[in-house]
Amino acid sequence: MICFSCGQSTSEFGMLGFSRPEAPRIGKITPAKYRDIAFRLDTLFTKMAGSRGFNGSVIVAKDAEVIYQKAFGFADKEKNVPLTDTTAFQLASVSKVVTATAVMLLVEKGLIKLDDTFASYFPEFPYPAITVKHLLSHRSGLPNYLYFLNDIVTSHSMVLTNSEVLRLMIEKRPALYLQPNRAFNYCNTNYALLALLIEKVSKKTFSNFLREEIFLPLGMKHSGTILSLDVFEDCICKPYDTKWKPIEREAADYVVGDKSIYSTPYDMFLFSEALYQGKLLNAESQALAYTALSREKKQSNYGLGWRMKDFKDQEKKEVFHNGWWHGYRTAFHRRLSDKITIVVLSNQLNRTAYQTYKIYQAIDADTSFGGESDVE
């Protein structure tokens, strides 16, 4: 079992009369019901793990029932430790979905407004026009801290924090890439700042807020941030490059919100089901989160923490996020109309984790179209 440090909460948020989310209802597994789909999925992933080098863990579910769950390969290649269903992966940018949901929880409680400026919470922030909504939708125009702090983020001997990112932004005042709300520009800085906002409003650390307000209530027993877990625990998988060389952590790993949340496919299935069942966010909040906010993007789009495809077709509409960070490749996809959940987590540099169109083909028994790998 992964050991997550509890720490002491510095907040009364949980005692303000706000109800916490409830654990989702999970259906009883009925193997005969999805036997054909499970067979197609196992055939697909066995092939991916064989000839295409997939090393990771997967879960596919529909309407609260797990159709397929399996792990392939190694958590620790050097020690010959296999991946299991409870092995935790760095979610990379799939973390943004969790961060955005945490923000929307605070919006529902009336503690944050989407049109609030970030500077109203952090007065020294040098970009007064940027709002919470701009950050969530990647329309802030901010530069990426991974680039303007490149000399720091790649260090293996330093630890960079969210507060330090904000301090250096105030000190250096890097030029905006775009004017706020001009256009979509994917940027990790947005979500590093949102983690600070969550801390400011809830008076809890980001790690404690997620643990107490999301992970524990939903039964996500193997989830936490890099700041709250024992990173030497055997059931946290190591990241590798294509030649099985371990990839070392660097300073930027310790910036949270944009990445650096760890979880398992099953825990993310619980997260997805809590959304489907309205136990985590209400229908209004979810509709807003799944609304395309960048009109200049025609084929795909972005809402509040979610990418989306087929966003004009309610039957096909898919909300998702992918991620990559060091050796981790992650995919979290949901088709809203039939409550499909797909989670693919990999700890080796390999793009097979992004080939979710093949998973949909296996689910729908449809091989009539090609498809292409998604990107982060």
Image (tube, rainbow, N blue to C red):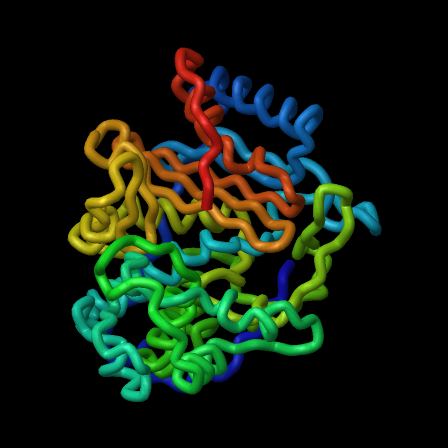
- Give coordinates of residue 12: x percent, y percent: 32, 84
- Residue 11 vs 100, above or below: the answer is below
Describe residue 173's horizontal placement relative to residue 242 as left or right.
left
**Spot occupied by residue 144 in the image (x, y as percentages of width and height):** 44, 65
Above or below — where is 296 with respect to 373? below
What residue lies at 29% left-to-right and 48% top-to-bottom? 302
Task: Report the front residue among 64 and 119.
Answer: 119
28 w.r.t. 109: above or below? above
User: Measuring 49% from the left and 18% from the top, which residue is drawn there?
Assistant: 35
Identify the image quadrant of the N terminus.
Answer: bottom right
Report the label total: 0
Q: Which of the pair 291/212 is nearer the observer?
A: 291
On the rendered structure, is 76 left or right of 190? right
Q: Residue at x 60, y 43 (%)?
A: 346
Q: Residue furthest top?
A: 368
Q: Quadrant of residue 26?
A: top left
Q: Residue 279: image x %, image y %? A: 28, 53
Residue in view at x 44 percent, y 13 percent: 367
Q: Position of residue 25 (x, y in %)?
A: 35, 45
Is any atom of residue 102 visible in this view?
no
Does residue 218 sit above or below 352 in this rendering?
Answer: below
